Image (cartoon, helix red, strand yellow):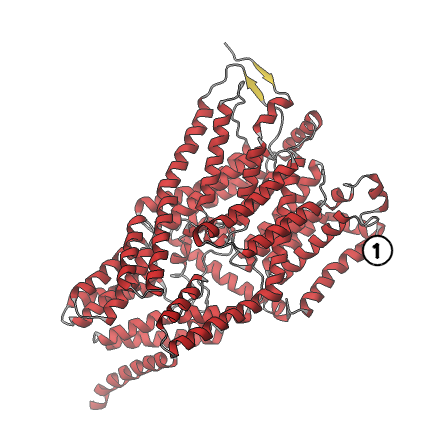
Amino acid sequence: MPERSRPAVASDVAPEQSPAWLGIAVGLLVARWLMPAESTASGATLWLVTGWLLLAMTWSLSRLRRWPLSPLRFDRIDLAVTLLVTPQVVSAAWLIATGDGNGRAAANMACEWISLLLAFVLLRRWFSKPTDFQALARVTLAVAVSLSVLGIWQHHVGYRRAIESFKTLQDELDTAVRSRDISTARRLRAELAAAGVPLEGPARQLWERRLRDSREPYALFALANSLGGLLAPLLIYGLGLLSAWRHSDGPETDRKGFFGRLSTAAIFLVAGFLLISYCLLLTKSRTAWAGFAAGGVLLAGGQVLGWIKERPGRVALGASVPVLLVVVAFWTGGIDREVFTEAPKSLSYRFEYWRGTLGVIADRPLMGTGPGNFRQHYLAHKFEESSEEIADPHNFLLEATATSGLIGLAGLIACVVLLLAGRHQDDTASSETVGEQGDRGAPTGIIALGGVFGFALAMAPGWLLEGGLDTRLACVAGGFIVFWTCLPAVRPDRSIQRRATLAALVALLVHLLGAGGFSRPALMQLVLLLVIGWRPWPNRGHVFASAPSLGPARLAVVGCGVLLMLVTLFAVNPVFQSSVADQQADNALLLRDRPGEAARLLHDAQRADRLDPAPSRKLARLRIEHATRNPVSDEVFEQAIRAATETSLRDPHNWVSAHDRARAVRLKWQRHRDDDVAREELIHWGTAAVDRYPSNPRLHAWLAETLAETGQASRAAREARQTIRLHQLLQSRGHVDKLLSRERLEQMQSLVQAAAEEGSLPQGRN
């Protein structure tokens, strides 16, 4: 017998969005933007993944308690995002199953992609009405304004204070070293390491150079480009709602114009737009600027000429604002001529990245490198004149293809096609829904509290693990509360919302075409949020079955529960245990100078996480350093070789893994020079390191020195000549962080000269 069904009334739909769920969802959403977007591969944000899984499981369970039960429905837009996410998860699973890469990075990124899909499905249903989505967008804009204030402070004050603080620590460290105050020196080195400052080598030189020469704000991200990618589309979205904000105070404001009555809300709105615009300029993110321009063109459309004819004064005033901001940025040193004159050079760098990425795709066309594993493969194809060891191709089309192969590209294309298809039907359905059901949304106060909850979530890890409160986050939270309170609330119709979100989405995608970020959940979360505003869930009214099938609802509960258990057992728990042991090892080494204890703790970290190569790499270097200082026992060399071998098994395509293994075997061969097997092995792994990163002159120099030591003078001379050529090429390009020291360069020249003299002796006898 066919099942009877009845249309839902407003009370039927209301339980689908509990205020508690809305607040938690907004909190998880906001917390993502308050943490470094570049730290996801290491597992720093896996706890957000568990939050989304727990929220989805709780919501699915709550649905089983209600009767009648609305069926679970998925539409074309859900399918589109699923096709975007699935190739990334499949590629990660394949990499972990075959052991063909860094399994920990792939697993962490797969978890992030799953959480993005869950967040999209839930938020699209819970924020389907224009008023609900606008309340969420108001929270997002308040976050953007508060982050902009932090970025402006960083540019004008923060960098100067950071330089002064670093100089003070460095002076104290130098004084402690000269006075042989070992305990103070250890403490200061630990403070520098905890602050993310490299202690020595080229990484330290590059860090000091960036601190000295850079002034680009980055807020709570790791890169200014990431901040620019967040600000540009949100600024476009805010500008797209200007007409709705103009009408938000009623017809009186409409007659007087937007600036006819400067209310507090209008003042804060203008101030917020100016702050975001100025911070966007300071980021020097050309791709974000290009995205903003593209979104602006789409937003304005063909209305510009009409505006000029009807309201020339307002158009002139609006055009003068960006000009004034650029002048202020020039005057304060925020931007300079090089930002524009160096643009062709920056574009040429992008072409180098993209051409190198094509080589990666050609090597691994089907499954790709796996999420989080692009850099290891890219370095083998990096152009010799390039310097940056990029972690993504700086183009989301190439990144989707490189990380998950042709199936990733197919999934992306299918996603775009499904999003663009059926626009007329969706628009009609949505307009009918608004007319029939009204537009009574969720409480805006709950959504605002969710934003505050997001700041609390972002501050919790530092407070719980380090015992301190991040003052930056606290100040940004205060700014968020102020701006959310003062920004005007609007009730835009569906057409205005869609137009604004589409323009913002175009702005973000243009940015991602040149800056990358496809694998950064913070930016992809914004992409999906804009898709929700552009393609909202069609509230046609739920149809409840009198005798519904509970199978799909129960399957959703079980699926979320299984995923939560798997993520907890195989991602969150091992990453947490490994990171704690790793931090304890750093403290034992830097603060107490106990390498034996540090090695034991790193071994514990290695066992806690069977996928992560980081503890094995640290242990290998610690063993190598110990074997270098104390070459008294064969067991010391064997320990170093075992640790380096474990690293190469966990990260088989990384040049560092091969180089560490070659260094460990070289120590053993130097003690037993008659060991032909060790000699062949060290040459094999030294050559493998060079093959994985052929444009690195330091690797060529090390291999040249090793070949000369093993008696292969001709091969050593070839490597030395290659070293000198790469050094000169990078020097001409201004890439000082990759250059050799004068002593090392003279050593290479002597190897070339010795080989030339040796080759000329037979000719002299003739």
Is residue 373 visible in the rendered structure shown here?
Answer: yes
Q: Is residue 518 left or right of residue 250?
A: left
Front residue of 207/268: it is 268
Q: Amino acid at mark 1?
A: Gly
Q: Residue at x 60, y 25 (%)?
A: 13
Q: Is residue 685 above or below residue 496?
A: below
Q: Is residue 745 left or right of residue 420?
A: left
Q: Is residue 234 left or right of residue 408?
A: right
Name which quarter of the figure residue 420 lies in: top right
Q: Is residue 546 above or below residue 524?
A: above
Question: Residue furthest toward the top?
Answer: 1
Name which quarter of the figure residue 698 lies in: bottom left
Front residue of 432/487: it is 487
Q: Position of residue 391 (x, y in %)?
A: 45, 57
Q: Position of residue 284 (x, y in %)?
A: 60, 63
Q: Residue at x 52, y 37 (%)?
A: 80
Q: Is residue 164 left or right of residue 314?
A: left
Residue bearing mark 1: 313
Q: Residues within 10 Å of mark 1 (few under 14, many from 20)?
A: few
Q: Residue at x 40, y 73 (%)?
A: 726
Name which quarter of the figure residue 514 lies in: bottom right
Q: Position of residue 256 (x, y in %)?
A: 85, 46
Q: Quadrant of the C terminus?
A: bottom left
Is residue 683 visible in the rendered structure shown here?
Answer: no
Front residue of 560/343: it is 560
Q: Position of residue 137 (x, y in %)?
A: 64, 43
Q: Residue at x 43, y 64 (%)?
A: 191
Q: Secondary structure at mark 1?
A: helix
